[in-house]
Image (tube, rainbow, N blue to C red):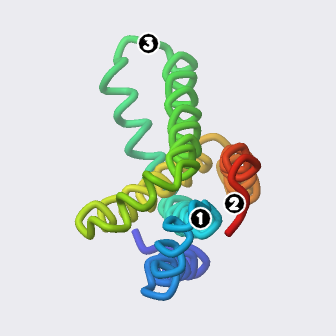
């Protein structure tokens, strides 16, 4: 099944946003802020990675929905359809919560600096954030179907609320 034009555009936008988020300039700014004890650059970088993944997850949302519903049917074959749907919604909500909660890691600039200085961890952390965004995007699609794009408004707001608890104590550099 071919993705529609808007889904293809969302995937291309996702890749472009990911490329910008892992660019050398943003990484240098992030490392510099971590050395100064700030969390601002990492917060912006994380948001870009999560939104990039969120776009991709929304773009492939119909495929994710098919896989998850098939998995729920395989895991709960004797359960009524309503029970399987409740299971799918609980899994989707958990994915959104986990994808947002990862932002707490960047509240501590020492964690950010450690990852900045270890290139292998940096690549893995960036990919993990992107994949968590992808999972969250698919989860938003599972919960809201065609209105899943609302996750593009809600998810960054939730993540910034988590990050702001650390920013208040450390300030922006």
| x and y, in percent, of residue 162 in the image | 68, 44
Q: Which mark is residue 152?
A: 2
SS assignment at label 2: helix
Can you say whether 155 is above or below 37 in the image? Answer: above
Residue 71, how many percent across, how many down?
A: 34, 33
Q: Can residue 55 be spotted in the picture? A: no
Residue 92 x/y as whole percent: 54, 36
Q: Residues within 10 Å of mark 3 (few under 14, many from 20)?
A: few
Residues 169 and 89: in front is: 169
- Quadrant where the N terminus sits is bottom left
Label 1 belongs to which residue? 51
Q: Are marks 2 and 1 in contact (CB under 8 Å)?
A: yes
Q: Position of residue 2 (x, y in %)?
A: 43, 74
State the residue lying farthest toward the bottom.
25
The residue sitting at 58% across, 45% down in the picture is 100
Label 1 near label 3: C-beta < 8 Å? no
Judged from the image, the secondary structure of the residue bearing numbered disc 1 is helix
Q: Please tell me whether residue 20 is drawn above or below residue 173 in the rendered image.
A: below
Q: Tell me if mark 1 has few (under 14), some (14-19) or many (20+) residues whose alpha carbon lies within 10 angstroms of its own.
A: many
Any mark on residue 76, and which? none
Q: Which residue is mark 3?
A: 79
Mark 3 and mark 2: span between their CA atoms?
Answer: 33 Å
Disc 3 versus disc 1: distance between alpha carbons? 35 Å
- Callout 3: SS: loop
Mark closer to the chain start, 2 or 1: 1
Residue appearing at x 32%, y 67% in the figure: 117
> Which comes before the other along the chain, label 3 or label 2?
3
């Amino acid at each position: 099944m071919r993705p529609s034009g808007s889904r293809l555009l969302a995937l291309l936008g996702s890749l472009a946003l990911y490329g910008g988020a892992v660019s050398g300039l943003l990484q240098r700014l992030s490392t510099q802020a971590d050395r100064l004890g700030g969390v601002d650059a990492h917060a912006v970088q994380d948001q870009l990675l999560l939104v990039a993944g969120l776009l991709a997850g929304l773009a492939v949302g119909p495929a994710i929905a098919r896989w998850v519903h098939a998995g729920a049917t395989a895991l709960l074959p004797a359960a009524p359809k309503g029970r399987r749907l409740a299971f799918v919604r609980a899994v989707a909500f958990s994915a959104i919560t986990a994808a947002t909660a990862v932002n707490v890691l960047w509240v501590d600039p020492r964690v950010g600096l450690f990852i900045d200085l270890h290139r292998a961890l940096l690549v893995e952390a960036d990919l993990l954030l992107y994949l968590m965004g992808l999972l969250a995007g698919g989860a938003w699609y599972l919960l809201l179907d065609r209105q899943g794009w609302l996750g593009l408004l809600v998810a960054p707001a939730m993540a910034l609320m988590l990050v702001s608890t650390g920013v208040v104590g450390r300030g922006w550099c």
